[in-house]
Amino acid sequence: MIYVDTSTVGVNYFFKESNSKVQFEAIFLNNLTASNGTYDASSTPISFSELFILSFQMGF
């Protein structure tokens, strides 16, 4: 049997003066493999993989 683990950590910071927000997210994938943009359990899993996302939003 293959066990699939996913962990996510994120930080948000809001700038009140400019009405904007910065977000950082780190996703850790264990025993997963990518297939056409989706993640599926695999019979030959990779041991560990990371995904980092940095985004910025601003209101007008």
Image (cartoon, helix red, strand yellow):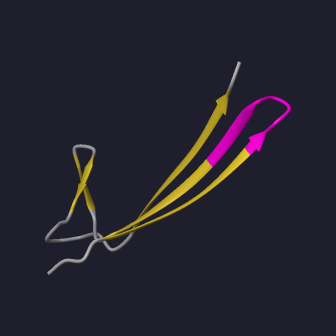
Residue that sits furthest to the right in the current view = 17
Front in this rendered view, residue 13 or 47: 13
Whole-percent x, y for residue 23 in the image: 63, 46
Magenta segment boundaries in residue numbering: 14-23
Q: Residue at x 19, y 77 (%)?
A: 2
Where residue 58 sits, quadrant-wise, is top right
27 falls in the magenta region: no
Q: Residue at x 27, y 44 (%)?
A: 37
Q: Quadrant of the C terminus?
A: top right
Residue that sits furthest to the bottom in the current view = 1
Where residue 10 sits, quadrant-wise, is bottom right
Whole-percent x, y for residue 34 in the image: 26, 54
Answer left or right for 18 relative to 53.
Answer: right
Answer left or right for 16 relative to 3.
Answer: right
18 falls in the magenta region: yes
Answer left or right for 43 relative to 48.
Answer: left
Answer left or right for 55 relative to 34.
Answer: right
